[in-house]
Amino acid sequence: MWLHHLLNLLASAGTIFFTGIGNTIAGWLIDAGFAVSFAVAALHKKKQENGWLSMLAHWREEYRPAAKFALWCCLVFYGPVVIWSVVKAVYEDHQYFVNYVWKHKAADKQSAAAAAITQDGLNGQISDLKAKCAGLEGANGVMLDQNRDQQNTINKCQEDAINRMAPEPERHSIEEIAVGKSLLGHPTKVFVYTTNKTITPVVVVVSCDSPIDELQGAIAGTTAMLGTLAAPMGPQLPNTWSFSIASPAWTPDTPITIQFSYAEKEAPKCLFARR
């Protein structure tokens, strides 16, 4: 790489040199040829006057001083021109590179200014987009809250609908409504057994903590009834009676009346259950 630059510098210096001496390469060769022609003419005249030997002797005696004199003349006359040519070539290269660097710096400044303008525009667009995104995020948050509230409302409605559609659990209640005496003179109790659903057929079990007798069970308000009469359930279940009603149905509007008597002084405590 350096050899290429050196050759370019020498070529530029040579061009400046020949331009400085006011001649071309051909003219410089003509000048050199003109100078040589004087030496050749002098030697030729010496040859004609004294012959070849005299001419050769004169050449041996004079060529060294003549060459030195010619070199000194070239150094004196052309040396400053050569130095000036080299210096000018270096200066012109320096100026060229200075101008080149200045142009690129100016182009870089213009590019930087244009880039700054473009960046400012992009920053403005980014700010606008951030503002829009913030607005969209806020709206999205509101919509998410509304959607969550609506979904909760829907879920609650579905739960309520399912609860309403679910069958009501079966519930029973027993209420004592009267106390009297049986035909045998034993005290009696009368209970009303209610339900919240229509049930048919039904089997009622009465379990007491002491003996009872003459237990009866029937649908209130009816005289015709199909089923089995109340009877003890056996020695395995003492003081436990049961009866069944196949018709009519046990409904919330038609409860079951249960009546029993007992011989003990204290009234037994009983539990009523449906099977």
Image (cartoon, rainbow, N blue to C red):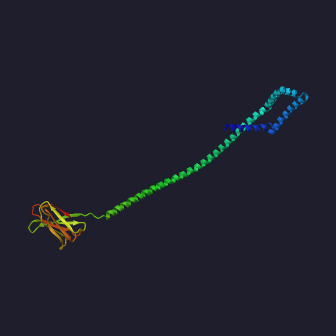
Q: How many marks?
A: 0
| Quadrant of image for the C terminus | bottom left
Q: Give the residue displayed 70% in from the left and 40% down from the top.
A: 96
Instruction: From the top left corner, tell me how far across and down residue 236 is, in percent.
Output: 13, 61
Instruction: From the top left corner, tell me how far across and down residue 196 is, in percent.
Output: 25, 66
Instruction: From the top left corner, tell me how far across and down residue 153 is, in percent.
Output: 38, 60
Q: Give the residue displayed 89% in from the left and 29% down from the top.
A: 47
Closest to the observer: 38 or 224? 38
Q: Is residue 253 above or below residue 86?
A: below
Task: Name, please, the residue furthest toward the bottom.
Answer: 224
Closest to the observer: 66 or 144? 66
| Quadrant of image for the N terminus | top right
* Residue 185 falls left or right of residue 79: left
Q: Give the residue displayed 74% in from the left and 35% down from the top.
A: 86
Quarter assignment of residue 62: top right
* Residue 48 falls left or right of residue 200: right
Instruction: From the top left corner, tell me how far across and down residue 76 is, in percent.
Output: 79, 30
Task: Name, please, the residue furthest toward the left.
Answer: 184
* Residue 219 falls left or right of residue 263: right
* Residue 149 falls left or right of residue 191: right
> Visible in this render: residue 24?
no
Closest to the observer: 207 or 222? 207
Q: Is residue 213 above or below residue 60?
A: below
Quarter assignment of residue 164: bottom left
